[in-house]
Image (tube, grey):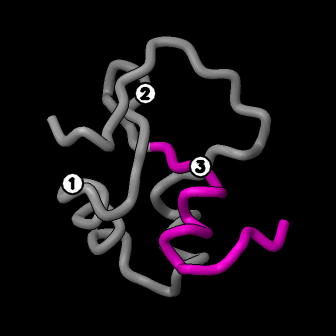
Amino acid sequence: MVATQKQIGFLLNDGSMLTTSEVARRLGAHINSVRHWADIGLLPCYRIGVRKDRRFRSEDVAVFLGSPDKN
């Protein structure tokens, strides 16, 4: 497992966690690109649930873009 992928058993989603699709839309990228960036450690993600779905923090996406989060 890549160091930036954190597996968590319980997560309260207060709206700050984004799905892979939401991140792809924000970045204007293909969903598979977002998955690849997470897999190689460029974009930190959390793995949740039985299916190990990826979730991303808005702050991490903003850092990935190189600009502060505007929300």
Residue in the foreground of this view, choosing between 63 and 23: 63
Judging from the image, what secondary structure is the residue with disc 3 in?
strand
- Can you give x and y, in whole percent of width and height, for residue 22 in the image? 58, 64
Nearer-N-terminus badge (3/2): 2
Residue in the foreground of this view, choosing between 9 and 53: 9
| Residue at mark 1 to residue at mark 2: CA–CA distance | 15 Å
Bin the neighbour count of mark 3 within 10 Å (Cα to Cα): few under 14, some 14-19, many 20 and up: some
- Residue extending furthest bottom? 28
Nearer-N-terminus badge (1/2): 1
- Can you give x and y, in whole percent of width and height, for residue 64 in the image? 48, 71
Which quadrant: the N terminus? top left
Kind of residue at badge 2 = Ile
Look at mark 3 in the image and give the residue it sits on: 57
Kind of residue at badge 3 = Arg
Q: Nearer the viewer, mark 1 or mark 2?
A: 1
Q: Nearer the viewer, mark 3 or mark 2?
A: 3
Nearer-N-terminus badge (1/3): 1
Look at mark 1 in the image and give the residue it sits on: 39
Which residues lie in the magenta part? 55-71
Residue 29 within the magenta-colored segment of the rendering: no
Look at mark 2 in the image and give the residue it sits on: 48
Residue in the foreground of this view, choosing between 64 and 53: 64
Examine the image and state in which quarter residue 6 appears. top left
Residue 56 within the magenta-colored segment of the rendering: yes
